[in-house]
Image (cartoon, rainbow, N blue to C red):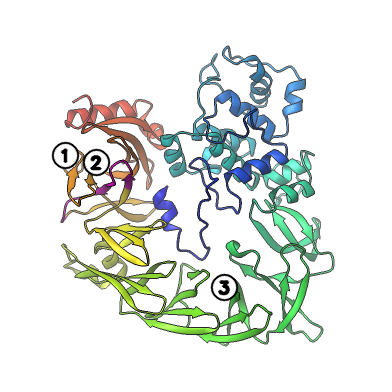
Amino acid sequence: MKKLLCALAFMACATLSAAAADVGTIRNDYPGDTEAQAQMLHELGLFNGTEKGFELEKPMTRAEAAAMLTRFLGAEQTARAGTWEHPFTDVPQWAAPYVGWLYENGLTKGVSATRYGAEENTSCEQFGTFLARASRNGEEPFWIVDSEEIAVCDAVGFVRGDAVALAARTLTTTERVQELYLNSDAHITVAQRLIDEGIFTEEMLKTAAWRVLPRHYECVPTRQDDKSEERLSCVIAGVTVMRNEYSNVKPLNYDQGFANSLYGLATNAQGKNMLHTIDAETLATKEIARLDGIEDLFVLGKSGLTDYIKGSHNGKQYLLIVTEDKQVRLLETPPALIEDGVFSYYLDENALVFEAAEMLCIIQGSEMQTLALSPNEKLFVINNNLIITQRVTNEQTTVTAWTLKGKVINQYTLQNDDPLQDERQKFENVVWFHAPHLENQSENFLWGSAGLYQMENDQLKQIISRPVYDYAFDPADGSYVLITHDAGKRMEYTEYAVQAQTGDTLVRLNADGTETALLPELPDGSLLLGEVLSTTNGRVEFTTLKAAEPHFMSRFTCVLENGRIKVTDADEGITMIYGENAVEEEQHRLDALGAGVGA
């Protein structure tokens, strides 16, 4: 999951840092943290706490999950008032109405023909399956939670905070089309269905979710059966919670992280496009400028007191700079680089930065400066006042840290120990993949086949130059556990037609800079490592990769204790292909190699 999050960190949307009140491992990129999401569900009548509060840090039993799922579906009173049958002998009396109602409605099953597993802790995969059924999307939990999230969450332990995060996510999930909706093109969210069933109202959703779930602003038809007349609206979880009955100003596309910087276009009596501001709280609009010929507008957001909107005219690129007093000026800029149809940029209180051909454009207020890049040098990430670039050639890689003013602070050069010798080196993306390079980031760290780096105090510090494909920090002794491989090796695999690199060994980088090999020496190809999940008291938890379905890698979860590997779990992809005994068979394989706990 860490790799997935890091790969998404520098996209058009700004990432939100996890708040202190986030509990559990499941994260939603929502304005409200886990505590706020729990309060929202509570206000909608979908989640209750205990006599001690929400207790989001506590595990959830299957019996408690049944009660929460029933409540989430608005069926608590129905369940408690009825008489429901189930075949399970281990369900406590208080939970029998919930389990029975879910069972008779095909929403839950037991762990055996006669046991529900009521007092067993719920796993992330199980709860995701419950919610997939509840959202009428079948039996697969992946409608709600992906396989990487499941692996990480179940390795750490599923808690009530994770249940809350997944339930909040489910409100926004689109259900399969049901026959009761006569329009075959109709798609509704779970939130809309619960409103249709009278569980809560649009106004209740607006009040509870206003600063918790993402808000979207768009022109929505005033009637479902008449799309000819649209009005400016605010939509939460697929539900129109507010409408300006007098305005057809069409909101510009915008970065969801900056939903309070809203602008829209409307055509005046002379046929000219007029730029309007939109009040995010009331939907009131105000005309501020006429835009002759400017098109393809996108609201980037706010830096300091200035809003930025990108646009184009006659093939030229412009920024609309909107000052605090809503004065608008145009700034012509070099054409931005666009990859996979996405304009990547960085925006915070200090600057707006985007990449053009062999340069970075840095805009502060209404002033623009450019930072020249060398051929093959690309922007990697921006962290507060640092700009990190990397230049990759067939021979070497250079990682550079710059200030926003274009001054070099740190620079590290790594030689490619295995340069390409054939025609493939003509293709830039092949060279990048083959040579050392950074490919992942967290809040303060960068890592990849070019090593592990820390961004701290406006400096870039190289922690280690050997390849690092994942890492975990051990606070007990200040060491790092790294997934890596020996010099000259290259561990590659393909998943979903995307080629990736990883390592085959674990190394502890001690606080004094020395290294300790953690895994026994194994024949080449014995292990392909995925992620390091945690380190505690000398115990390391990690995953290994195994090919499952075509073009898909699944994962074993393993524990390393006293230099030996114990296989503890396998995800559904492995058990589906290799059977329920896959964990035991993998353990026997490692034992035979002398690396397992049974060796």
- Decide whether residue 474 is among the magenta residues: yes
Label 2 sits on residue: 527
Would you name the residue on which mark 1 appears? Answer: 522
- CB atoms of marks 1 and 3 within 8 Å: no
Q: Is residue 431 above or below residue 189?
A: below
Q: Quadrant of residue 476?
A: top left
Where is residue 293? Give x, y as percent: 65, 86
Place of residue 396 in the rendered image (x, y in percent of width and height, measured from the top left): 21, 69
Query: Horizontal and vertical percent for residue 517?
Result: 18, 43
Q: Are marks 1 and 2 in contact (CB under 8 Å)?
A: yes
Q: Which residue is mark 3?
A: 304
Q: Residue 193 falls in which quadrant of the image?
A: top right
Residue 486 drawn at (x, y percent)? 17, 51
Q: Measuring 51% from the left and 59% from the top, which residue is drawn there?
A: 15
Which element type, helix, strand or loop, lies under badge 2?
loop
> Which of 515 and 594 lies nearest the eye of the viewer?
515
Which badge, 1 or 3, is on the more N-terminal residue? 3
Residue 343 visible in the snapshot? no
As drawn, the residue found furthest toward the top would be 89
Please, what is the three-letter code of the amino acid marked with disc 3?
Gly
For label 3, the SS is loop
Q: Secondary structure at mark 1?
A: loop
* Magenta segment: 472-488
Residue at left offset 16%, top offset 68%: 421
Mark 3 in CB contact with mark 2 (< 8 angstroms)? no
User: What's the residue type where badge 1 is placed?
Assistant: Leu
